[in-house]
Amino acid sequence: MRIKEHFKKLTKKANKIVITTHIHPDADGIGSQIALCMALRKMGKDAICVNEEPLFERYKYLDPDNIVLGLEEYKAQYDVEQEIDLFIVADTNSLPRIGTNVQQLVLLSKDLLFIDHHPCPKELQAIHCIDTNTAATGELVGGLIEAIGVEFDEAIALALYTAIIIDTSSFRYPTVTGNTHALVSKLMAAGVKPPEAFNLINGTKKISHMQLLGKVLSSAQTTKDETIAWICLTEQMIENHESDAEDTHGFINHLLILDNIKVACMFRKIGKQVKVSLRSSDDSIDVGIMAQALGGGGHNHSAATVVEGELSDVVKRTISKIEKMLSQV
């Protein structure tokens, strides 16, 4: 209730509103900011979405009104010296994560508001719209849109539904509750068709993509007790199979069906670095804390970090550390 009242108070007095999300955004952040912007425009607000980079082509179907601009596009179309009444950051509670250039817009803003569900200090949570018990930022945004009295139309509903299915890995994480599905019911009533929405965000795949998935899964490994399983991806593998790195995010979830699994890992080489993704469907295993110990962060069931080094070395070191951490659980 406090979160909704705080949001209603800030949006009521604001007219010019800028909404952003984290750099390298995926559909949970993008869908959340688009839905929120559409709703605020229905209230008569001068709202716009501004990200560090332009919207990826694959997400443009979520933005029929072209309300998401890259920073350079925004500068070309708007008076960037004009004061911003409210600057909203969706799907992160860290200003460095929105990009060094977009951060400059905060200096022109009267009020700053984070709308997020990621873990954060309680002091930050107290003055922003942050609910760490919510399954998805899209779920939180849906509740805020209802709080300001805006009805879901099909475009808003599709953006929210897409944000939720991505953030919950199609409702498989333990943070999903009856409230999540209650909101989804309203989104469906507004016109969302789940099979269609799922296909739009995941896209149709070429046989080369399926072959890449098969190659990756066929080389999956586990520890002796099978509590940790992992897969590896290189840039060359993705290129050879004419695939997009964005389409590999869900590969790790295939490991969660294994017997005895506690932590699933995916190692993806990116230049001189390795992105380490962690997943767990066990409430007693907090991969967010594990990721923090490895220099990253995230939720208790979904987290990541980036490590410098060669792929084989990073895998060996990381699995060893996770084994040690699991031994303390």
Image (cartoon, grey):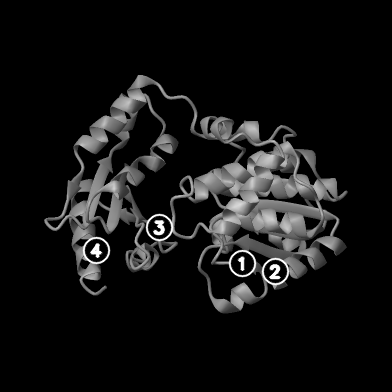
Closer to the chain start, of discs 4 and 3, is: 3
Rendering quarter of residue 195: top right
Query: Helix or strand or loop: what does disc 2 sit on?
Result: helix
Closer to the chain start, of discs 4 and 2, is: 2
Which residue has dot 3 on it?
Answer: 303
Q: CA distance from mark 1 to mark 2?
A: 7 Å
Q: Nearer the viewer, mark 4 or mark 2?
A: 2
Q: CA distance from mark 4 to mark 2?
A: 36 Å
Task: Give the position of the C terminus as an image quadrant.
Answer: bottom left
**Label disc, if present, on residue 3 of the rendered structure:** 2
Which residue has dot 1 on it?
Answer: 130
Residue at the top extreme of this rendering: 207
Amino acid on which disc 2 is placed: Ile
Amino acid on which disc 4 is placed: Ile
Q: CA distance from mark 4 to mark 3?
A: 13 Å
Query: Helix or strand or loop: what does disc 4 sit on?
Result: helix
